[in-house]
Amino acid sequence: MAIRLRNSLTRKVEPFAPADPENVRLYLCGPTVYDRAHLGNARNVVVFDVLTRLLRHDYGADHVTYVRNVTDVDDKINARARATGRPIRDVTDETLEWYHDDMAALGNAPPDVEPRATDHIDAMQAMIAKLVADGHAYAADGHVLFSVATDPEYGSLSGRSVDDMIAGSRVEVAPYKRDPMDFVLWKPSDADTPGWDWAGPGIEGIGRGRPGWHIECSAMARRILGDTVDIHGGGNDLLFPHHENEAAQSRCAHPGEPFARLWLHNEMLLVEGRKMSKSLGNFFTIRDLLDRGIPGEVVRYVFLQTHYSKPMDWTDDKARAADATLRSWRALAQPGGTPDPAVLTALRDDLNTPQVMTELHRLAKMGDGATLAASAAMVGLLTDELAGWDAPAVDLSPWEAKLTAARADAMARRDFAALDAMKAALTAAGVQVQMSRDDVTLTPGPDFDPTALEGAE
């Protein structure tokens, strides 16, 4: 079965065909490194990690190049540096290290190439100069701006009309623009702001400055992957203006082949049914969850339960259920298997990870630990990199014996009050209680507190 993916440009699920099967090229818009990554930041990384695993399986590990950029020049970074009194490079280096640690904690493999924007200023200047020379950009008040009116295809990616885009709150209005939709390619820097001397072909009135956000990915993607990438991705909040602007400036700078053959975007994230917001008190970084004792593999499992094209709702109940499931799967998993065909079919069908999870439950129920492990690894679960978190923090076997005896006594006497009280005490202590006809299993959950069991009977 050929891989099928949802193309944001055509708004259809369609067969994926790379330009060169020997060189499949992916580009994901990466972090702006000024603060910790939150849950929403991590979702597209998990999606692209799963996609990369599938592509490496189908095309060969050596025939896929995954690029994820780092934005390390940005006004938010400048503001954070000023607020903390630290050098900008210290802020970006520290934040990028946090990002790497948090993404690895979720089981994501690093990209093949991770370009930093500040290392590619020359490529950005060259692209800007070409856009000016070809009549697609102009200088004004120390800025260089892209002229949206020169691109008849502008708006095709996001599907927005010009009026809708102008009405959007993310369109910056400035007196030096010829058109409200025009966007900045280069802007001046003062003495206290990072900047680079203009080294490209002369453009009147343009000197020391820094790039606008959108030009970064166009220049770096072309330098590393060529004129056209096979798949370009990110969260759907990037569709407009970021990806719309990337596509416009790229096709105008290098007409002919499209900038991306397929655009892939994931939907946003909710927390307990509500939009994640600091004002609502439901804003979580990945580090917040890890520090609460929720393993990265559990976070990843919860992500995979929802298709990437649908809003994902993070809940503590889902995390607790994921914890229990993964513990049972890890107890069953064995090496030496191969991925189940049904798992591969689900992945090739637009990365249908909810169906993958259904198939993994089926394999676990069958007791096929080797196929379960190999199949789960296709979505980054049950891997050696994420192993170890499921080791019990305390020996609960005495409580299992007590609960087994209490159940036998309750069945004999037909009085379940004492059994229910013991189960309630264990649950209140964060222990996950599983009782089958023949067995009792107690598992420390993510909120397990052994001190709560002291003196409980």
Image: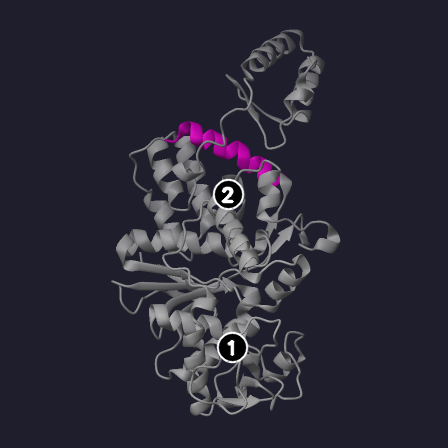
Residue 68, image x and y in percent? Answer: 43, 61
Q: Residue furthest right?
A: 279
Instruction: Count every numbered label the image shows and give the total.
Output: 2
Alpha carbons under labels 2 and 1: distance apart: 34 Å
Q: Earlier in the sequence, mark 2 or mark 1?
A: 1
Q: Amino acid at mark 2?
A: Tyr
Query: Which of the two residues, 143 or 259, is positioned nearer the viewer here?
Result: 143
Query: Which of the two residues, 97 or 20, is positioned nearer the viewer here?
Result: 97
Disc assigned to residue 301: 2
Query: Which of the two residues, 439 or 288, is positioned nearer the viewer here?
Result: 288
The residue tagged 1 is 245
The rendered magenta stretch, by its main secondary structure, is classed as helix
Q: Which portion, as a residue range, is magenta?
A: 317-333
Residue 173: which quarter of the image?
Answer: bottom right
Question: Which residue shows up at 74% across the image and 52% down it?
Answer: 280
Please state, as top left, top right, bottom left or bottom right, where the C terminus lies in the image. top right
Please state, as top left, top right, bottom left or bottom right, where the N terminus lies in the image. bottom left
Disc assigned to residue 45: none
